[in-house]
Image (tube, coloured by chain):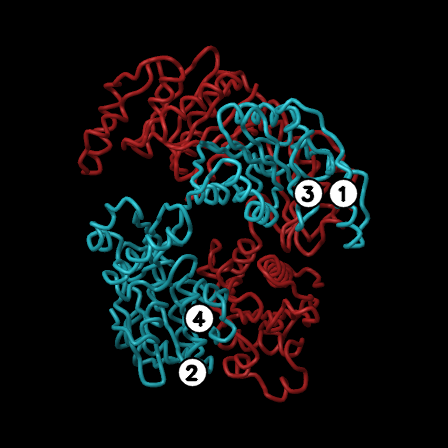
Chain colours: A cyan, B red
Amino acid sequence: MQAEIVTIGTELLLGEIVDTNAAWIAQRLATIGLNHYYTTTVGDNLARITEVLRHALARSEVVITTGGLGPTVDDVTREAVAAATERPLVLDESLLEEIACFFARRQAPMTENNRKQACLPQGARVIHNPVGTAPAFAVEHQGHVVISLPGVPHEMKHLMETEVIPYLRERFGLHSVIKSRVLRTCGIGESVIDSKIADLMRLTNPTVGTAAHPGQTDVRITAKAESLEEALALIAPVEAELRARLGDYVYGVDQESLSDVVSRLLAQHGLRLALADMATQGELAQWLAGSAQSAMAFAGATVLAGIISLRVTLDLDEALLAQYGCPSQPVADAAAQAARRLHGADLGLALIGPEDPSAPDAPPVYCSLATAHGVIAAPPRRGRSGPAGRGWLMHLALDLVRRHLLGLPIG
Amino acid sequence: MQAEIVTIGTELLLGEIVDTNAAWIAQRLATIGLNHYYTTTVGDNLARITEVLRHALARSEVVITTGGLGPTVDDVTREAVAAATERPLVLDESLLEEIACFFARRQAPMTENNRKQACLPQGARVIHNPVGTAPAFAVEHQGHVVISLPGVPHEMKHLMETEVIPYLRERFGLHSVIKSRVLRTCGIGESVIDSKIADLMRLTNPTVGTAAHPGQTDVRITAKAESLEEALALIAPVEAELRARLGDYVYGVDQESLSDVVSRLLAQHGLRLALADMATQGELAQWLAGSAQSAMAFAGATVLAGIISLRVTLDLDEALLAQYGCPSQPVADAAAQAARRLHGADLGLALIGPEDPSAPDAPPVYCSLATAHGVIAAPPRRGRSGPAGRGWLMHLALDLVRRHLLGLPIG
């Protein structure tokens, strides 16, 4: 059994918009044990879409298309599926009524073009679309099936979850489930993790694998089973063993980011955090402010453009700057205290780095957290420049806050 | 004549990394008049890559592959091209020597696997890769050609520019040139632009089209000609006419962002700009700090999390806040002056908006610029939430600075 995906749209082909549907569908298909081997992108051209669909249907049991179901003359997926499966398009009266109702509810005019959307390949199974006007459909052809979904991601996802996955399970007897659980870690390198869990990485069901990102490493546990319950039961003891070995380096699970976790902890403690940032150019503020519960947790940020800013903006002691220089731990400590005071916050977090982190002999970045009871510091980290370097620093800084709030050891 | 692209890699197929190569190649091929109709993504599997290449070579004169040229067992593009073009792989001694030199220069050990990279399909034309170890190559087969490039973007781009484009021009007699020029505008809506230039949008060579983005609209002029000089000559009078009609709404050309333009103007004037930001959560600071010449132009930012921050951080007058409320124009004016003073800057720019911009009755966002000679303001703008809303506000704010520095009328 294999599936393939055909994404339709000239704007995708030319890279004017980036396709995220194919990867999402692939991951969703994997969860029911359906492998996906090809993705083809083709523009809004009837002959070429038809050719691609014929070829896909010949080699794959399941073909999923996205896009080209709208009302304009560019939208020719319906016609292409009809041609590739050798049947005419026919008007579906009940579908036409449904589309008319959709417009009536929104008090929007229905155009003649929208009628086109009610025309489907003869014998198609209608997949009703409660979240948009483009009806989706499935057509069986010589034992294989082509399923056409809208290109709008939230419509496509809704229809995949509620209609397509149940249909595929039933139609092809796909009763296995693939379930993943991700443990998210920071403050520990991928190679150290590998050495701690090497034996678990040789398991076959569930499997355990790692993936490194700037500042954090994911440990993924993936189980294949006959039901979700059985998959979760396979995952649970391995997750427990991994947590025992990785300890407090695990900060969250699945989609949780470190900024989500820290915002939640701050909100739980009723504390607000301010930043003094001379290392990420405001990116840390944006990351924290963009996370859930940030409204209760984020007190503001001072983004410093250089050493002059430190003196003027944070009103740091001249003697301190003269004695220790910048960056240095005492200056980071003072900046954290200044951020706390300036923004009227409970906690002040400072990242103080060199003006040019890309210089070969650039000094390290210092990270301090000021509380009502004093200042704590993370181990200084030699900077890397660019987005990955900022990713490392943002995790270093927020992990210091996480460890403080949870009473965990630092460094 | 048509071209197609085959991107190779299981990590692409599964969406673990986003492919940016295909769109870049498509745009580059368009500049020499070569149309691109299909992109296929396939995993690291010899049989499936071979099948995809056979199919692609049968329908397209030019097939460009990316990826699968590394030294590991997963890298099977060489084998697949050999199979699809019905010839053996042979060791190229001069290529082997070149790879050995690459490792010697870097004082890195060359492994047995790297020998594999010197094996190419018989009769392949070697495309030397001075920027990496993976050699690229072209194979002609029944009058069509498959060109295999590495997947690492900077290597692929270098080889496309220096080797592949000249080869394709020569081999297929592609002497036409497609050249685009983009005029970037802000402060004027797409529909207003359309009404001003409707007649020019009906031209056929060059063509003129618009594309709206949050806060700014691009006007693209595209000419097709026998040479670059001729294309530029076609573009010039249309650009002049567009500039005459759009006037000072045009802030830059091609890849220039408004933050690049403002940073450059600030550096030219020897002025440094500070921000008081209660509307973009630090995104404006990051945008400005990330642009060229920002080191001379950006003096720092105060990111405000709410009204409490205004009072504490910026030390704003209680009476002012009580009289006008927040957000309001007088508070934005005072915040701009405070940012200028706090960061020791020449100019202070403030964006002061509601705490919850997504509320249906949210008040507008106020934007002020403080200079040594007083404060000027942009017209207040009713906020939109989300990334697009922040895009609008960032353009509004930086356009105020641009207009001030160029002595243009405001609002």
Q: Position of residue A316 (x, y in %)?
A: 37, 79
Q: Can marks 2 and 1 be said to lie on one chain? A: no
Reading the image, the residue beneath label 3 is A134
Q: Identity of the amino acid at label 3? A: Ala
Mark 3 vs mark 2, CA separation in Å: 55 Å
Q: Is residue B17 visible?
A: no
Relative side of A92 to A63, left or right: right
Q: Can marks 3 and 2 be said to lie on one chain? A: yes
Q: Position of residue A366 (x, y in %)?
A: 30, 68
Q: Chain of mark 4?
A: A
**Nearer mark to the viewer, of 3 and 2:** 3
**Which tag, 4 or 2, sits closer to the chain's start?**
4
Residue at horizontal 46 percent and vertical 61 percent from the top: B296
Snapshot quadrant of residue A358: bottom left
**Which tag, 3 or 2, sits closer to the chain's start?**
3
Snapshot quadrant of residue A265: bottom left
Badge 1 marks a residue whose secondary structure is helix
Residue at horizontal 77 percent and vertical 54 percent from the top: A106
Reading the image, the residue beneath label 1 is B197
Reading the image, the residue beneath label 2 is A341
Q: Is residue A247 visible?
A: yes
Q: Identity of the amino acid at label 2? A: Arg
